[in-house]
Amino acid sequence: MRKGYNPYLLPPWLRKCRFYCKGIIIPITVFQLIRLLIVPTTGDFLLFCLLCGIAFLLYKNII
């Protein structure tokens, strides 16, 4: 098993995809939070939790 995570071992297209996802996940999450505060439904809450989890994983370089 490898020790640590090196994003440069990923293919170039996947690194580019991570870069763009990392830039757009926060605005989408904020929009979803505003929508959740206005009309709280179960689906909105689950989507917000999923987006928060993805944002956390992207910014901690886990995925």
Image: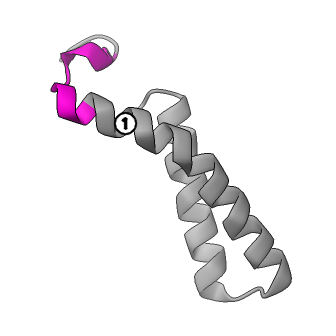
Q: Against 41, is 61 above or below?
A: above
Q: Which residues are magenta?
A: 5-14
- Of 42 and 30, the residue lying toward us: 30
Q: Against 12, is 33 above or below?
A: below
Q: Is residue 35 visible?
A: yes
Q: In the rendering, at what x and y percent does residue 47 appear?
A: 56, 71
Q: Quadrant of the C terminus?
A: top left
Indicate yes or no whether the magenta region holds residue 25: no
Q: From the viewer's perspective, tell me whether residue 48 is left or right of residue 34.
A: left
Q: From the viewer's perspective, tell me whether residue 63 is left or right of residue 41.
A: left
Residue depicted at 20% across the width and 24% down the height:
10
Coloration of the structure image:
one colour
Q: Please identify the quarter of the rendering in which residue 45 is found.
A: bottom right
Task: Return the residue at label 1.
Answer: 18
Q: Secondary structure at mark 1?
A: helix
Q: In the rendering, at what x and y percent does residue 36 appear?
A: 75, 77
Residue depicted at 19% across the width and 25% down the height:
12
Circle 1: residue type? Arg
Indicate yes or no whether the magenta region holds residue 12: yes
Q: Against 28, is 59 above or below?
A: above
Q: Please identify the quarter of the rendering in which residue 42 is found.
A: bottom right
